[in-house]
Image: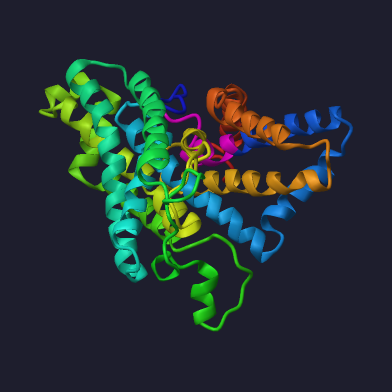
Amino acid sequence: MAGGGDAAGGRVVPRWVDLGVIPMVNLAAAFALSGLVILAIGENPIDVLGLMVREALGYPEAIGYTLYFTTNYIFTGLAVAVAFHCGLFNIGGEGQAYIGGLGAGLAGLVLFGWPWPAVALAGVVLAALFGAGWAFIPGWLQARRGSHIVITTIMFNFIAAAVMTWLLVDVLIKPGQQSPESRAFPPESWLPTVDRVLAGMGVTVAPSPLNLSFLLALAACVAVWLFIWHTPGGYELRTVGRNDRAAVYAGIRPGRAVIVAMLVSGALAGLVGVNEILGAQHRLILNFTNGVGFVGIAVALMGRNHPAGIVPAALLFGVLAQGGANISFDFPAVNRELVMVIQGLVILLAGALENLFRPSIEAALRRRRRDDDDGAVPAGEGRA
């Protein structure tokens, strides 16, 4: 549990400090270290980081791309968070998103030429089902055979990649071409982009891959919040995650909770396929996930496994993805690998070393509390 207790038994670190201040301190430290790395290669860190922010948020097209990346990170961050609440470390979001994309792509291929609402509805359902199905097997192995979820999920990432390669090379490839991808979906079945939707309302914005799946991601945040904290099923997951023996004593079956958590987690990761396949690529291609499942782990950790924290954390990594993609044009020494170093420092400080500054913050709060107590006027004093 985050935070500790003081002599009076209260919380040393208030919840708003734990969820807000500490992550911001960790983030500031990560960017300070990133600045030192940029300085070491001979560039001005303020100019580099400023350009990165402008390339991600400085104009409408950039904002669209940033939110497009953010959508994927919201889905995978939620997927990791749901499993984590049940005491599971699901690092198979990459494979689950990959197979979820297969489900979304099959909707586009089978319903070829259908209007986008029908294709989108089928794509959402199939992407969630395929992602959940891919996560079910590791969940069942953990619940029934005791196989460690970390091992099975990471192995299923490799299996998913092999399956998709086989399908797109030998089965679903468009006849007469060598590129391992399916035929393109017709435009009427594409998930509408936000610029097209706004154009229909008379608002003109620059085109970008940002599509309606961004709204689906926000709806998923609300659904996860309701499920985890306001339903009996969510309570069972959190109880098993805190203490599985206590859960058994309370009449909860940990095995079932594990399977449910992995099904929900896989379904959320699978929705990445809706954004990528139906909203952006409009065909099945290889490697469309591009590591979003692993970034989702950092998003969940930084967001404290709560949807309210996952959204800004996903936005941060969306800024890094979009801003870092274009920064080398102005600063050739700042290449893609250096941007990955910045991402790694954020992950390190917000994840593995998330409690690095907690003792100092707790000590400062204790001193402030003692000063407030010493400065308080006792009852009855100050009167004539």
Answer whether residue 15 is magenta in the image.
yes
Main SS class of the magenta portion in the image: helix
Viewer-side residue, 162 vs 266: 162
Answer whether residue 59 is magenta in the image.
no
Percent of width and height locating residue 176 = 46, 51
Image coloring type? rainbow
Q: Is residue 28 left or right of residue 45?
A: left
Percent of width and height locating residue 346 = 62, 33
Q: Which residues are magenta?
A: 10-23
Q: How many marks?
A: 0
Percent of width and height locating residue 11 = 45, 30
Query: What residue appears at the point 36 percent right and 31 percent down from the top-left corner?
Result: 84
Locate the N terminus by quadrant.
Answer: top left
Q: Quadrant of residue 155?
A: top left
Of all residues, the one furthest to the left in this rendering is 251
Query: What residue appears at the point 40 percent right and 24 percent down from the top-left corner?
Result: 154
Q: Is residue 179 left or right of residue 231?
A: right
Indicate whether 42 appears above or below 207. above
Q: Is residue 273 left or right of residue 70?
A: left
Q: Is residue 370 visible?
A: no
Q: Is residue 266 left or right of residue 181?
A: left
